[in-house]
């Protein structure tokens, strides 16, 4: 509303295209941040959990019912489009016909081929008998009717409602949704949940009954008995025969295939389609009763819990859909609070390292990082050795080596510490080297034929190569220390700064350069006072781009090889599927990147305020 009012007030005073017109607008920034936050709250079930804290537990109890009935539904069209028997008939019949056409005639004689064809014909007859409703055994009919009645009884209990049902004291004592390691409490905490939990328990007995039902038509009993004996005798005779290795293997493989299909038919899992219609209708009626018993829960689930809902799997209930990988904002904040706690002893930080804090840094470590050990090798003379009495007297060369190694104590200074600082430090150091070396080279490439012709092929040769392509090589050379990561980031920043500075220098107006020559300016004065200021917008834009690319490359490098840093945290979180921690690292990266960008905007505004106002 504020934005619309402001636009109406200033519409006549502002000209479209004026950069000043884009300044301000904090109210639109609030809208821009709020929109994704509302989407996050919705699709992470944060809104649903806040206003309907018992819904996940009730969906869990419904999930229990779905879990125990899944084997029954899998055998019916209501759960898998086709009867399982239909699929078994089609698969076994097709395999038998294919097996008949693929019979290795060179491995079996004519009598054996005739016998094998009889086996296949008999098995096709078994399939036909099992599919015929008129040949269904009385026992199977009775069991299927009993199964349908049991399913009907479950439907009646659901429709009767949860009147008189109460959750147990143990269930009410469970931690709330999202407050413990087991995110959704398993025991029912509402009357409706108790109803579904009771029905799910009884449905488990119904499923056990379903597992026991087999279809062995009387017409198949004698065929199976005879066929089993004949196949076994054929197999024994084949194994007793003397054949070369290739023929023996072909015979054994074919007989094994025939025997495998026969064992599937002997299981009695094929039923006539008409015989299962009663069970299918009973399951459909149970689904209707389930929907009726859900009542308002169905509306709440549809409106406030996008996705598949809650699924029960073995020992726990899990959120499905976007809520599975998109944790609630408050859970992310809680995880961040735990990481940000500087007290390692109380569980703060990550892997024994704080997220962002401070420490006393020995100055010697800084010296050891900046000064190479080889500087001591340049001093004439030899390093000291021990005397005959075992004493060692260091000389100047030894003292210089100790200085370069950071072994000389110069006191300590307060310094930032932690995973965030390690990542930021690597970016800043690499960026600093990239600017110090890349900008001068880029400026000279913009004004010198030699520099442009000599260095341009070299820069353009490695610049298009993705940074991650260099990462394995560089990390192999330098190891997992900071040196390798900083050098990798330096390569990224250096190329960007060279291109930016060269573009800015070559874009300087020729009239300004000739005017400077006319006024008697020297080469260094022209570079410093004319070319550099004209290239500064491109250079600062290059720095802004380099920060973003370096930041993204660093995280990837820390994922590949690192023991600290934001990328290291995300890599560990990924391996254990800790989605809260993954989102914390993503938000940290985004906030730090935004902070860097705000700093660069401020630097650009203060350094080149004249840009765009020519």
Image (tube, rainbow, N blue to C red):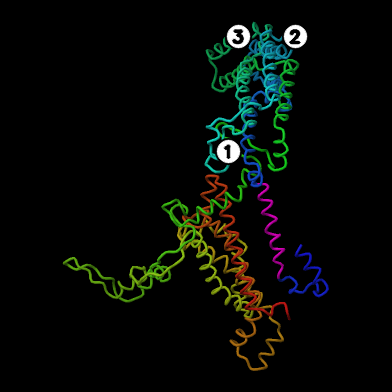
Is disc 2 placed on a helix, strand or loop?
A: helix
Q: Is residue 533 magenta?
A: no
Which of these two is toward me, 18 or 299?
Answer: 299
Is disc 3 placed on a helix, strand or loop?
A: helix
Badge 3 crowding class, 10 Å Cα cut-off, few under 14, some 14 to 19, many 20 or more, is some
Q: Is residue 27 magenta?
A: yes
Pick out the residue farthest to the front.
164
Main secondary structure along the magenta-highlighted residues: helix
Which of these two is toward me, 37 or 582?
Answer: 37
- Contact (CB < 8 A) between labels 1 and 3? no
Q: Which of the 4 quarters of the picture holds residue 79?
A: top right
Q: Give the number of the mark in front: 1 or 3.
A: 1
Q: Which residues are magenta?
A: 24-43
Residue 367: horizontal and vertical position, in percent? 40, 71
* Residue of label 3: 230
Which of these two is toward me, 317 or 187?
Answer: 187
Residue 341: horizontal and vertical position, in percent? 48, 56
x 65%, y 25%: residue:
69
Which of these two is toward me, 151 or 259?
Answer: 151
* Residue of label 1: 184
Real-space Cα distance between discs 1 and 3? 56 Å
In primary-sequence order, the first of circles 1 and 3 is 1
> Which quadrant does the C terminus fall into?
bottom right
């Amino acid at each position: 509303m504020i934005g619309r009012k402001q636009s109406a007030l200033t519409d006549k005073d502002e000209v479209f295209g004026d950069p000043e017109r884009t300044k301000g607008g904090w109210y639109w920034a609030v809208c821009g941040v709020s929109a994704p936050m509302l989407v996050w709250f919705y699709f992470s079930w944060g809104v649903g959990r806040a206003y309907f804290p018992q819904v996940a537990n009730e969906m869990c109890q419904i999930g229990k019912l779905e879990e125990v009935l899944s084997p029954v539904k899998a055998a019916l069209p209501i759960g898998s489009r086709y009867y399982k028997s239909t699929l078994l008939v089609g698969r076994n019949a097709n395999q038998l016909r294919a097996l008949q056409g693929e019979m290795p005639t060179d491995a079996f004689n004519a009598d054996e081929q005739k016998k094998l064809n009889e086996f296949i014909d008999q098995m096709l007859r078994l399939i036909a008998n099992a599919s015929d409703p008129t040949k269904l055994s009385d026992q199977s009919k009775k069991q299927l009717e009993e199964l349908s009645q049991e399913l009907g009884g479950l439907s009646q209990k659901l429709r009767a409602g949860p009147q008189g049902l109460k959750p147990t004291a143990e269930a009410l004592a469970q931690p709330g949704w999202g407050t413990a390691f087991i995110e959704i409490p398993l025991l029912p905490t509402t009357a409706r949940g108790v109803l579904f939990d009771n029905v799910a328990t009884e449905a488990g007995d119904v499923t056990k009954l379903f597992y026991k039902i087999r279809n062995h038509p009387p017409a198949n009993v004698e065929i199976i008995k005879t066929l089993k004996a004949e196949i076994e005798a054929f197999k024994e005779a084949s194994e007793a025969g003397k054949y070369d290795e290739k023929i023996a293997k072909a015979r054994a493989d074919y007989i094994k295939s025939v025997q495998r299909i026969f064992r599937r038919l002997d299981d009695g899992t094929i039923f006539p389609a008409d015989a299962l219609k009663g069970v299918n209708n009973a399951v459909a009626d149970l689904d209707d009763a389930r929907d009726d018993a859900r009542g308002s829960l169905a509306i709440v689930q549809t409106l406030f819990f996008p996705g598949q809902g809650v699924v029960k799997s073995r020992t726990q209930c899990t959120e499905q859909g976007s809520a599975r990988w998109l944790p609630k904002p408050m859970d992310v904040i809680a995880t961040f609070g735990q990481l940000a706690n500087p007290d390692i002893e109380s569980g703060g930080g990550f892997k024994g390292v704080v997220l962002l804090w401070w420490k006393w840094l020995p100055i010697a470590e800084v010296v050891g990082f900046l000064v190479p050990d080889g500087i001591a090798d340049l001093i004439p003379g030899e390093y000291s050795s021990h005397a005959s009495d075992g004493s060692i007297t260091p000389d100047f060369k030894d003292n210089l080596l100790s200085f370069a190694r950071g072994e000389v104590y110069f006191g300590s200074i307060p310094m930032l510490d932690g995973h965030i600082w390690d990542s930021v430090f690597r970016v800043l150091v690499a960026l600093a080297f990239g600017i110090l070396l890349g900008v001068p080279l880029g400026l000279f490439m913009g004004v010198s034929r030699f520099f442009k012709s000599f260095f341009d092929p070299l820069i353009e040769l490695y610049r298009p190569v993705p940074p991650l392509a260099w990462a394995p090589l560089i990390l192999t050379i330098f190891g997992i220390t900071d040196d390798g990561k900083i050098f990798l980031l330096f390569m990224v920043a250096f190329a960007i700064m060279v291109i930016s500075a060269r573009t800015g220098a070559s874009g300087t107006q020729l009239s300004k350069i000739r005017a400077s020559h006319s006024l008697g300016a020297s080469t260094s004065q022209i570079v410093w006072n004319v070319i550099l200021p004209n290239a500064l917008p491109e250079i600062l834009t290059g720095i802004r781009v380099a920060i973003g690319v370096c930041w993204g490359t660093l995280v990837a490098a820390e994922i590949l090889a690192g023991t600290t840093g934001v990328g290291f945290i995300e890599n560990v979180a990924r391996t254990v599927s800790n989605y809260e921690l993954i989102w914390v690292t993503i938000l940290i990266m985004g906030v730090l990147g935004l902070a860097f960008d705000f700093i660069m905007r401020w630097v650009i505004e203060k350094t080149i305020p004249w840009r765009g106002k020519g």
